[in-house]
Image (cartoon, rainbow, N blue to C red):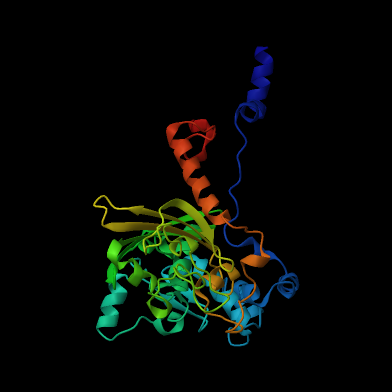
Amino acid sequence: MDQLLTNLWTRGGWFRAFTPPVVEAAPKGTPILNVPSDVLLLIGDHLQESDALSFKLACRSTFALFPHTYKTLSPSAKQDFLANIERDPLGKGTVLCHVCNKLHPFQETAGPHSKVEVDDAAAGKSLKAGKCVSRDRFAPAGNPFTLSYTHARLAMNRHFYGPEHGIPLANLCVEQSERRDAVAIRCSTSAKIMDDELFLRRTYVLTVADADVADFRSCTGPRDLKLCEHTSLFAAASPFRHSIPELQKKPAAGDDGLVPCREAPGSCGLCLMDYDITIEHCADETSYRIVIRATHQLGSCRSPRDWKWARFTECYRMHVFYPSRPNRRGSVYGPGAVQKRWADDEMEACAVLDGGSSRGLFGLSFLG
């Protein structure tokens, strides 16, 4: 045995037997550049124009190899290329403008009624993207929320690409209060991202004195309050406008009062908006309190032409006299589907916090 150990030691076998193998470090540099140029050009032939330009800008070697330039790209290819830059670390602090095909800088405080935008407007200034997206925003008659597509895209960019690429959801959650004719209106907004899509809930609290109900019902047309571009509180002349039937009902006594109800459901037939309405007498019995919760599904906000967003703002209308298509009537989203999705998420969150779900904390079963 001693002789065997001596032979292994002298011949290096002992060292080789008890020494772990040395793992060679991975070669530094870019291995793809070791591929012949013909192969790289062949790869480029199978790429989209925007992806080929991104490949070209990877390093000096590929820059000299591919003939693509930004000026030669089609408008749609430029948009795809800028979208690649937007989500790249190089594009931190910028957002893609679909109107002018440019990247605009943004501030983390941006949002509906953000102080920066309000101050700039008061000073006669405008953000670089202001003129581009001034029309593509949610601002139906009597309900100027001023949520633009840029705000929604920035919120989703933060979700998809990280904090430095967008704004927090809290920026979209603003509150508004105003007095309009015979009614006092208070509105609050909450936002969620579910299944990579943006959801908003707008809660309207209206207070109307008993003696002013008749005047309240006469607030039609421009004086009316719209929950979306297609649904107003009271009936309109257009056959493509919806209204809330609970506000039209009158007591059996025949006076001008409102009929109490609780969480009566309703929905828009064109955009993804569901609502419920509660009407009740205030404690002083001299006024009514109306609570309307409108829930909107806006999609992933990757394009302003996506019908979920397009029906939300109705910025791109194909014909003024007919409902824009595609819309909800041709989709799989039935009445109440958006409201149910919001409620299911809240119930699921409560179940997780209460320990009644098998998913465990934050959906992780091993933390349950």
The quadrant holding residue 142 is bottom left
Q: Residue furthest top?
A: 1
Q: Nearer the viewer, residue 217 or 157?
A: 217
Q: Looking at this view, is 350 or 110 the one in front?
A: 350
Residue extending farthest front? 253
Q: On the image, which quarter does residue 6 sit in? A: top right
Left/right placement of residue 111 relative to residue 60 reads left
Nearer the observer, 31 or 89:
89
Along the line of sight, the residue nearer the viewer: 26 or 110 = 110
- Apparent side of residue 254 relative to residue 119 in the rendered image (left or right): right
* Left/right of residue 138 with respect to residue 18 in the rendered view: left
Can residue 162 be seen here? The reply is: no
- Residue 165's place in the image compared with 322, above or below, is above
* Image location of residue 118, percent across then percent down: 29, 76
Dividing the image into 4 quarters, which one contains the N terminus? top right
Seen at 65% across and 13% down, the residue is: 2
Q: Left or right: where does residue 185 sit relative to residue 138? A: left
Image coords of residue 334 (percent x, y): 62, 58
Image location of residue 232, percent across then percent down: 46, 70
